[in-house]
């Protein structure tokens, strides 16, 4: 089962997505793409792993960490599939980051490594944009880099965990304007899915809808206004969005 | 006017009162807000000065150019009277007295000059933390443990707090006054903090900013079986017992 949230006539609806990737309402109506707005498929805490692929750590000249390096995003930054992300003016280092996102399915507190997968409800795809010009060495990566309005597309939908028997062997790909720019595999995760669920649940209670963005492999590239960026996790989903300029963004707010 | 929340028959009720004595504190209240909670770290002059020499060393290399922010996740939020649960074997746990700035109107890219127009009112926050041993990496482990953010007991209308940048903050552990500070100790003002955050994070109605917490000295240490109270002039008193996790 694939579950999503959409905005239709200013109303938030819980919908499913069928095998042809069409949106189906609870009443069974099939909606045409373009007649609704995709929302993030869940609402919850958003954890993100920094440097959770050895190749990406090398690319950023970091040694792989001894324990998960986790940061948080606030809900303002999340947007759904097929939406627009704005690039601030006067920056040089805006990078996409394609990530497998784990969605918690039931309340988890002090969960063991052995039991951790029972708490995974499903998976989705995330694009954890970073504006690296804004990095500072305080609570790094700081919120100005990672928790910006429109900077975290997630979706399009959550696919049930039962449909992804091995989350540690999925190909990850990013395309800019149709050109393949990033390719990796979740088999290279430093801290895998059960480890992350267990680790976080030993710090705090996880609740259904919480998201764990598991990190991105190597393959950084800059993006520019007008670019169409597609991030894909094999078997999970294809998440598209478009980069716009700050001026376009500000104008869209005024409307 | 005071705004507070209680749970009745599994429903959250948003209630109002003209005066503090009208609010029954014997029943545990819910956290006074239910939106996103963003804290401003290193926003106390004494704390900042105590670390200034370190800011030019590795890993920081240079002092912060912008206010340093962190997130207190939902699982940390508790109301007046609810127990703060402290873990064993994680070292000392500290109270973090702070003014809570509650947003009353959606704030996106607002200026310092207009920032106070977006404030609904003020509340009291106890931003509990394990020792702040490093400001280099996000402090999820130290700050996002369940019950580590009492908020309340209510939100006081901004109109009833005429000097938000000059309010005495007192912390009592077991009825003994153990720490005093003031909102005049903030490095970045209330207006500056709202304008800065809203420059890239749209603040929604009900979101809250933790204005700044002081240097965590042993005076602020809390242990199981203590009762901790944070009092802010013109806002109120937030009381929470402390229990072992």
Image (tube, rainbow, N blue to C red):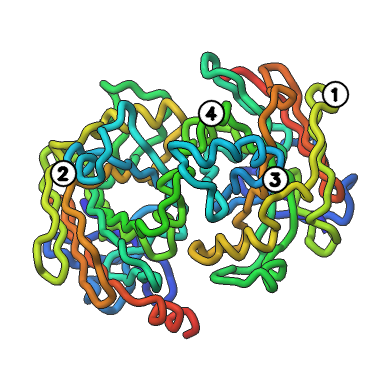
Q: Find the distance from the CA under tag 3 to the CA under tag 1.
A: 29 Å
Residue lying at 70% horizontally and 45% vertically, measured from the top left: B6
Q: Earlier in the sequence, mark 3 or mark 1?
A: 3
* Distance from the alpha carbon under mark 2 to that under mark 1: 58 Å
Query: At x 55% / y 64%, what residue is drawn?
Result: B198
Is the residue at mark 3 from the same chain as the one at mark 2?
Answer: no
Residue at 40% over, 54% down: A146
- Looking at the rendered structure, the secondary structure element under dot 2 is helix
Which residue does the numbered mark 1 point to in the structure image? B176
Chain letter of disc 2 in the image: A
Mark closer to the chain start, 3 or 4? 3
Q: CA distance from mark 3 to mark 4?
A: 36 Å
Front position in the image: A22 or A212: A212
Can marks 3 and 4 be said to lie on one chain? yes
- Secondary structure found at label 4: loop
Q: Secondary structure at mark 1?
A: strand
The answer to whether residue A35 is seen in the rendering is: yes
Q: Are marks 2 and 1 in contact (CB under 8 Å)?
A: no
Eye-nearest disc, 4 or 1: 4
Q: Which residue is mark 4?
A: B133
Q: Quadrant of residue A77?
A: bottom left
Residue beneath label 3, please? B6
Where B59 sits versus A241, above or below?
Answer: above
Q: Label 4, label 1: how many angstroms apart (C-alpha)?
A: 26 Å
Q: Picture coordinates of residue A58 (x, y %)?
A: 20, 40
Q: Is residue A8 left or right of residue A1?
A: right
- Look at 16% across and 64% down and name the residue there: A21
Gap between marks 3 and 2 measured at Cα: 41 Å
């Amino acid at each position: 089962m694939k579950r999503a949230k959409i905005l239709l006539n200013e109303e938030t609806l819980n919908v499913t997505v069928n095998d042809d990737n069409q949106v189906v309402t609870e009443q069974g109506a099939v909606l045409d793409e373009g007649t609704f707005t995709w929302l993030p498929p869940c609402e919850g805490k958003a954890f993100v792993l920094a440097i959770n692929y050895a190749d990406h750590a090398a690319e950023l000249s970091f040694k792989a960490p001894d324990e998960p390096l986790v940061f948080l995003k606030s809900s303002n930054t999340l947007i759904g599939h097929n939406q627009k992300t704005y690039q601030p003016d006067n920056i040089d280092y805006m990078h996409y980051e394609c990530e497998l996102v784990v969605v918690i399915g039931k309340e988890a507190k002090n969960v063991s490594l052995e039991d951790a997968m029972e708490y995974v409800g499903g998976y989705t795809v995330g694009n954890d944009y970073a504006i690296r010009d804004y990095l500072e060495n305080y609570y790094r990566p700081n919120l100005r880099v990672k928790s910006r309005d429109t900077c975290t597309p997630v979706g399009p939908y959550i696919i049930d965990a039962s449909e992804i028997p091995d989350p540690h062997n999925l190909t990850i790909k990013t395309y800019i304007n149709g050109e393949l720019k990033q390719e990796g595999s979740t088999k290279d995760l430093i801290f895998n899915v059960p480890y992350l669920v267990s680790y976080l649940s030993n710090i705090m209670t996880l609740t259904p809808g919480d998201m764990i963005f598991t990190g991105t492999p190597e393959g950084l590239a800059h993006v520019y206004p007008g670019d169409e960026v597609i991030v894909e996790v094999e078997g999970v989903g294809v998440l598209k969005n478009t980069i716009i300029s700050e001026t376009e963004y500000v104008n869209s707010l005024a409307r | 006017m005071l705004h507070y929340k209680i749970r009745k028959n599994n429903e959250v009720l948003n209630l109002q009162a003209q005066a503090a004595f009208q609010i029954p504190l014997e029943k545990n209240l819910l956290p006074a807000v239910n939106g996103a909670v963003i804290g401003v770290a290193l926003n106390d002059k004494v704390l900042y000065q105590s670390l200034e020499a370190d800011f030019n060393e590795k890993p920081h290399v240079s002092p912060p150019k912008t206010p340093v922010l962190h997130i207190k996740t939902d699982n940390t939020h508790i109301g007046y009277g609810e127990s703060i649960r402290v873990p064993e074997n994680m070292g000392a746990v500290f109270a973090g007295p702070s003014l809570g700035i509650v947003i009353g109107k959606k704030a996106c890219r607002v200026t310092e000059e207009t920032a106070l127009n977006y404030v609904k009112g003020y509340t009291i926050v106890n931003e509990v933390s394990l020792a702040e041993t490093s400001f280099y990496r996000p402090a999820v482990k130290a700050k996002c443990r369940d019950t580590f953010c009492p908020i309340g007991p209510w939100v006081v209308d901004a109109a009833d707090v005429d000097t938000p940048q000059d309010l005495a903050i007192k912390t009592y552990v077991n009825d003994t006054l153990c720490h005093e500070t003031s909102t005049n100790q903030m490095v970045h003002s209330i207006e500056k903090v709202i304008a800065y955050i809203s420059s890239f994070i749209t603040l929604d109605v009900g979101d809250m900013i933790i204005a700044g917490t002081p240097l965590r000295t042993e005076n602020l240490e809390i242990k199981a079986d203590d009762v901790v109270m944070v009092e802010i002039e013109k806002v109120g008193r937030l009381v929470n017992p402390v229990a072992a996790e």
